[in-house]
Image (spheres, helix red, strand yellow):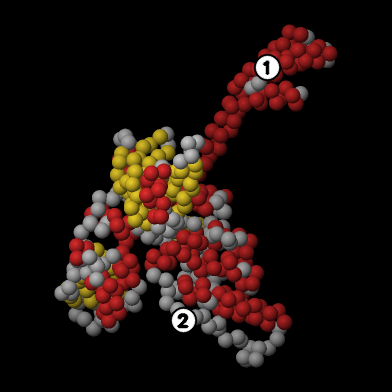
């Protein structure tokens, strides 16, 4: 019987022919007529030809209908459940995050006060799971989930034994910004983890032993290092290490105006063009990974995973372009690729024809001015350092800088245009944004 089942499953015609006389002989031995035995075997043979596929197709159709109904009628809960099913598959989570945004669903960043160990729905949005971060276990995050919310880091360390969480997991939480509600300076938290874990251990041990502290019954709060926070690009880079993709922003967002002037389109725009046939264009991307392979002829080629604010994508890079651009295709690098895009079935195939580092690609895009909105006139002194660097930039990239001051001691907004011209790169814009008293920096 098992040999017959195997032959049916493999659709092995020769094996089925060998099994027929054995089946008929066995049926006759059990009192079944030869005609009936032949009829039954004909049915088995017919099923072997199409029945397996048909039965699976029917089952998958039912499941497809059910999941489609859930996604259409309960999209937030559906996507949260799907992401929880693949909670440790970073590549899939990145794709799901894009789909969540496409559906217009808010995806809240991981937070020790609001997020759960798995993906959670809160107020019509999805709270990113603490257990979905790299090197973070779901069970360890249940310890945090059970004690929520927390007033500050000391409160968390007092009520959750951070030794049970582990330093590696806490590092990922800090990089991802999960402690922002308790301490917005992510670098300070990361560099103070040894102190915080030791303090938590002492607090836990004292609570377990019911001893009275030498400090009057309460430990003094832990003292974290007084270090400046990461710049916005650095924060995104650290977040990428923990999440596996850019969640709260994207490093190319600051480049958007100058990329447009340089004729660079987004991935979504290029896909729309390719819908009408093969298209060639320039797209910018932040490199996530590169896998090199060797062809049968011995030449090397690569598959490069990239992303921009509109999606994740992969480009194939053949040997001549790879040799020229390999140095720029390291994870974390921002590049501009000239690609040929073609839609094949439900996939977009990208073939790279040229690669440039992003700063070189936009160098000839022309000057760009900025408006800096200030709520504190004292911030003008801090502006001198980044503006001094911008003043040394190439003349063709220099534009005007206007300062917009507002505050309680002013009758309204006061606009000041600086007399010099400055090459305010995206990196310098990020440095200006970090200055206390700077509300916003926008291109003009």
Direction from residue 359 to residue 293 in the image, left or right? right
State whether residue 151 appears in this view. no
Q: Position of residue 338 (x, y in %)?
A: 32, 46
Q: Position of residue 329 (x, y in %)?
A: 41, 53
Direction from residue 116 to residue 421 in the image, left or right? left
User: Which residue appears at 37% of the width and 49% of the height?
Assistant: 324
**Front one among 266 and 72:** 266
Secondary element at tag 2: loop
User: Which residue appears at 50% of the width and 59% of the height?
Assistant: 243
Tell me: residue 105, above or below residue 16: below
Q: Which mark is residue 14?
A: 1
**Front one among 221 and 385:** 385
Q: Quadrant of residue 211?
A: bottom right
Q: Quadrant of residue 217?
A: bottom right
Q: Position of residue 334 (x, y in %)?
A: 37, 57
Q: Quadrant of residue 286?
A: bottom left
Label 2 vs 1, first from the N-terminus: 1
Picture quarter with the C terminus: bottom left
Tag 2 residue: 226
CA distance separating discs 2 and 1: 78 Å
| Neighbours of disc 1 within 10 Å: few (<14), some (14-19), many (20+) | few
User: Which residue appears at 58% of the width and 61% of the height?
Assistant: 135
Q: Which mark is residue 267?
A: none
Pick out the residue farthest to the left: 419
User: Which residue appears at 41% of the width and 51% of the height?
Assistant: 326
Badges 2 and 1: C-beta atoms under 8 Å apart?
Answer: no
Tell me: residue 32, above or below residue 89: above
Picture quarter with the N terminus: top right
State whether residue 381 appears in this view. yes
Tell me: residue 267, above or below residue 333: above
Secondary element at tag 1: helix
Q: Position of residue 372 (x, y in %)?
A: 25, 71
């Amino acid at each position: 019987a098992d040999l017959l089942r195997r032959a049916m499953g493999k659709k092995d015609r020769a094996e089925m022919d060998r099994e027929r006389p054995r089946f008929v002989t066995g049926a006759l031995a059990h009192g079944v007529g030869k005609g009936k035995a032949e009829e039954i075997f004909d049915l088995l043979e017919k099923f072997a030809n199409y029945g397996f596929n048909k039965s699976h197709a029917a089952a998958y159709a039912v499941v497809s209908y059910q999941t489609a109904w859930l996604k259409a009628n309960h999209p937030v809960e559906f996507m949260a459940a799907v992401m929880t099913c693949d909670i440790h598959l970073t590549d899939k989570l990145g794709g799901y995050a894009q789909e969540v945004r496409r559906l217009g669903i808010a995806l809240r960043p991981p937070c020790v006060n609001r997020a759960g160990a798995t993906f959670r729905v809160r107020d019509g949005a999805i709270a990113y799971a603490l257990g979905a971060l790299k090197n973070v276990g779901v069970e360890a995050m249940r310890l945090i989930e059970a004690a929520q919310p927390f007033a500050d880091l000391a409160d968390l360390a007092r009520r959750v034994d951070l030794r049970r969480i582990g330093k590696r997991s806490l590092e990922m939480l800090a990089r991802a910004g999960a402690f922002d509600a308790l301490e917005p300076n992510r670098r300070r938290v990361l560099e103070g983890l040894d102190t915080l874990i030791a303090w938590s251990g002492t607090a836990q041990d004292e609570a377990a032993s019911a001893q009275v502290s030498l400090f009057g019954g309460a430990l003094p709060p832990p003292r974290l290092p007084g270090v400046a926070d990461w710049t916005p690009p650095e924060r995104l880079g650290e977040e990428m290490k923990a999440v596996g993709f850019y969640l709260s922003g994207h490093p190319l967002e600051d480049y958007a105006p100058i990329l447009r002037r340089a004729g660079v389109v987004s991935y979504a725009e290029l896909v729309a063009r390719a819908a009408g046939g093969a298209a060639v264009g320039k797209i910018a991307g932040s490199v996530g990974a590169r896998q090199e392979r060797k062809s049968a002829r011995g030449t090397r080629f690569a598959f490069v995973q990239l992303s921009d604010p509109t999606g994740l994508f992969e480009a194939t890079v053949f040997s001549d372009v790879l040799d020229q651009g390999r140095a720029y295709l390291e994870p974390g690098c921002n590049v501009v690729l000239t690609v040929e895009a073609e839609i094949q079935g439900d996939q977009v195939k990208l073939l790279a024809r040229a690669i440039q580092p992003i700063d070189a690609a936009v160098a000839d895009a022309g000057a760009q001015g900025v408006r800096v909105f200030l709520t504190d006139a004292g911030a003008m002194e801090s502006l001198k350092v980044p503006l001094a660097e911008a003043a040394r930039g190439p003349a063709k990239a220099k534009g005007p800088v206007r300062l917009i001051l507002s505050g309680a001691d002013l009758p309204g907004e006061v606009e000041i245009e600086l007399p010099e011209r400055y090459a305010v790169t995206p990196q310098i814009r990020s440095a200006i944004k970090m200055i206390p008293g700077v509300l916003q920096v926008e291109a003009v």
